[in-house]
Amino acid sequence: MARILVIDDEDLVRFTVEQILIAAGHVVATAENGAAGVRRHREFPFDLVITDIMMPERDGIETIRALKAEFPNLPIIAISGGGRMGNLNYLEMAKDFGVASTIPKPFTPEDILDQVDAALRH
């Protein structure tokens, strides 16, 4: 069992990922944007963070950079349905900032659980 923070601006995505993780025995908290997610992690650090990339207030790349600057060993999984914007592939960019893995939307429960298990093992 791990403490996992899920950061996503879409209510349905947050709820879905939360339910998948709770069913697997994890303790889950959520945040609706990167700014709120960073604040929650500072208050009581989590074992793993799952963050969306395309969000208001603080996007996923900024969130990843802020968390990695303060907590360099924190495993982070980036998720996104944004794909490409021009020449930018946001999930590939997230890898450059040290995420454990990336998951494109839409995803299956198995996609989430496989990546969470792998991230927590390292």
Image (tube, rainbow, N blue to C red):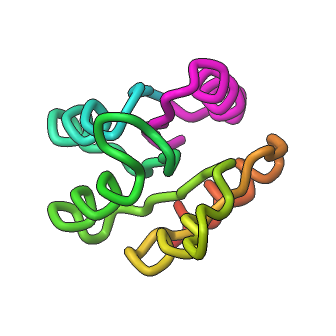
The residue closer to the viewer here, 45 or 108, is 108
What residue sits 66% from the left and 20% below the top? Answer: 12
| Observer-nearest of 83 and 15 | 83
- In the image, residue 47 sits, relative to residue 75, either above or below, namely above
- Where residue 114 appears, as percent x and y from the top left, is 74, 57
| Horizontal side of residue 101 vs 67, given as left or right | right
- Magenta-drawn stretch contains 97: no
Residue 56 versus residue 16: which sits nearer the camera? 56
| Image side of residue 109 versus residue 118, left or right | right
Residue farthest along the front direction in this orientation: 86
Give left or right: position of 77 versus 70. Answer: right
2 relative to 61 in the view: left or right: right
The quarter in which the N terminus is drawn is: top right
Q: Position of residue 87 (x, y in %)?
A: 59, 75
The residue furthest bottom is 96
Residue at image point 37% right, 32% down? 33
Q: Relative to 57, does residue 114 appear above or below in the rendering?
A: below
Exactly how many numbered labels are in the figure? Answer: 0
Determine whether 81 is above or below 62 in the image: above
- Residue 82, x across and y down, in percent: 64, 51
Q: Quadrant of residue 23?
A: top right
Whole-percent x and y of residue 26? 56, 34
Residue 2 is one of the magenta-drawn residues: yes
The residue depicted at 29 percent of the width and 35 percent of the height is 57
Extent of the magenta region: 1-27
Measuring 44% from the left and 51% from the top, which residue is drawn there? 48
